[in-house]
Amino acid sequence: MPKIRHSVFVHSPSGMELAGLVGLILAVPAVAYLGRSGRRHTGAARRAHLLLAAGGAIVTAAALAGLITALTSGHTHSAEHSRSLATAVAIGMGIGTLFLLAGTVVLPGAARSPAAALRHVLDGLVIAAAVWFVGWVLVSAPTRILGDATPERCPAILLPAVLLVLGLGLTAVLGLHAHRPRRHTVRVAAGVTVVACAANLLAIGICRSAGEFILAAGVLMTAGLAIVAWAVRAADRPVEICGDVLERGAAYAVVPMLAVIGALGYHLCQDGRMDMLGYVGVAVEGLAVVARQYLALEDVRSYTTRLRQSEAHYRDLAHTDPLTGLANRRGLQEALRTEPDVAKALIGIDMDGFKSVNDLRGHDVGDAVLAEVGARLRRNLLAGDVAARLGGDEFAVLMRGDSGEAVLAAHRLLAVLGEPYELDGGQIFLSASLGVAATGELLHDADLALRYAKQRGKNRVEQYQAGYDELLRRRGTLTGELRHAIDRGQLHLVFQPVVALPSMRPVGAEALLRWTHPELGKVGPVEFIPVAEESGLINRIGAWVLRESVRQLAEWRAAGHDVWLSVNLSPKELHDADYAGRVADVLAEYGVPPQRLVLEVTEHAVATDMEELVRRLAEVRATGVRIALDDFGAGYSSLTQLRTLPVDILKIDHALVAEPESRTGTAAPLVDVVVRMGHRLGLEVLAEGIGTQAQLEAVEEAGCRLGQGSLFGWGVPAEHLESRLRAERPTPRPLPAPRSTPPNDAPARSQVVRLGPGMRQVRALLPGDPDFVPATRDQNVGSVDSGREIGQG
């Protein structure tokens, strides 16, 4: 048989081919740098850099292996061998290019999530398919823009060509949508695209044995990898992430579709035919657009869901108290507006004394107490009830039901909230005041009832009544008018005498504040003193009362009246750190001895803030001023507290003084006990509120030496009391008749002095003693200068 002779090509390495080989070798340092960069970084940057390094290594290895094989396989080889080698090189470089593209997509800043990376790939595929189809139209018949240079006999370039257009599309997408600063990511993508272009040129050069293509491939390969290596140095720096789908443009989808439509129309107008490559381009374009639109719809759906969740979250924040988890004021108002036809009642709650918890234990402990209050309210709610924290220590419960059910629920909550609060630092005891409203404007009416409950002593439940509106308006009027009462001369003092018993001779007085308004008339202290304390006017009013009282006392002393004067003291005044100094300054200004002034503080006020007020009272008492404990016996102070308090005088509460008439009609046993206890503690005892002869007899029988009440006179202006002092001024005692002085060794005479029921004292006095007085004569209490002297019998 005749032998078939194959055509062969004699090929010698040209200078261009050798230069291309050198160019490929020069790309090795760039690959090494990418490897070092991948080992140096961490996290997402490390993964991206390692992918880039792996892709660069594969591309470089495939290119070097293919080119070296082509140059060293012999001077004579067939065209089929060249095409096979070009195909192998193209596949190897294509795999490396895929690694490079993957590394580009996962670079920090390229996409914020895998889903975003997938969107970028689809967007790039849309652009790549359009470029592919337009390119196919240009190089295929009938256009054949490359003419005879069209690489029809080199199918090996198809894979690099596909990756080239994909690189172009991805570069365009990253240029549009990568996070700022996006220039580093775009440079990496551009470098990968240059590498893909080099893969195409190298495959064509090997397939055609064209040295110029090989040289261009070597140069572009080195340039592309160098661009990638240079760009990745900053690709892991912080980026500005924007996830708002509304900020994404749509030109990446519209322009490629228009390009495909235009190219297809041109191709058909030129009587062109569609082959497999054209169909693939159009099909990929359509599928990519459909897939991208599906993801876009999912993006919009997800974005809408997040918006709804965010709206619900912020709505909850706007209507929820973050500390307790209860509704806030806005949430309560919204609940009040819902179901207007359903009978509702509102319970307003305020924790009594909570401020002291913050002051003494700190705000962390205070927050823990508030959280526990919220938990207790939540545990005691019925279905449909709403608990809310309105601010600070103020809460509210909106419930379904009538006023009777609301009052019962309020009493139940009063007991629940009054239980001890167990914390790490021990137990905290608090009470609550509650106001109930079931009709009208619930929030307003419940607040009025709550304020009324606090004014009436706290730790109680009050139901709203129509008269509370008038009380509130009057209280607002009093607050406004009281601010100008001193400047307008509407305040004045009256003085109620304090008498010695049993002679009933005035030895002192108590200054009482009165307010006469030109329109409101006479306003009682029971009404305007709480207003002054709540509005912060009590310090100014108290300073005016102190100065006027001391001035009047100085005038009486200048007129020769040996009396002392007591002034009521508000606990809020004692909280002034310089109060003791101001008292001393006023006394020094008018030249009044400190022991002539008595400051009265109520037993209730001391019991509510014992430790602080004891310290303040001690500072005032250190100036020489005497302290009286008013309303003693109302049930607040214990015996231990009484021994701790820096007081000189006990003023028995009028309720104890009136006890004989309200019970047995005999001597009041509690008055007797208080008098004995006071004397044993070295304190003087004053019985106030004596209004009948029976009460006077009971007080005298108990051994009390000072009395005050309507029986001895109401509060009167200073000039009226001064007239009485002049009328009842004791006459000078005549000098005793001369008599012989008893001898020094004469026996003393014993005399029994009755101090009270069951209490007697034996005193030994010489008959010639000038201080001898009968046992029935009362002591001149007005002339004593100390609390110890005033308590002697």
Image (tube, grey):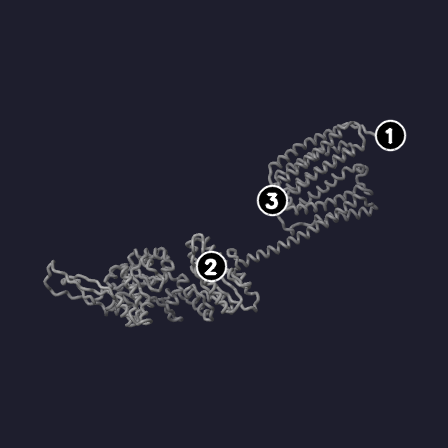
| Circle 2 or circle 3, nearest the eye | 2
Q: Position of residue 658 (x, y in %)?
A: 32, 70
Tell me which amino acid carries mark 3: Val
**Mark 3 Cα-neighbour bin, 10 Å: few <14, some 14–19, many ≥20:** some
Residue assigned mark 2: 393
* Image quadrant where one finds the C terminus: bottom left
Residue assigned mark 1: 4
Residue assigned mark 3: 239
* Mark nearer the N terminus (2 vs 3): 3
276, 666: nearer the viewer = 666
Tell me which amino acid carries mark 2: Asp
Q: Position of residue 648 (x, y in %)?
A: 29, 60
**Quadrant of residue 272 within the rendered picture:** top right
* Mark nearer the N terminus (3 vs 1): 1
Relative to 15, residue 477 above or below: below
Q: Are marks 1 and 2 in contact (CB under 8 Å)?
A: no
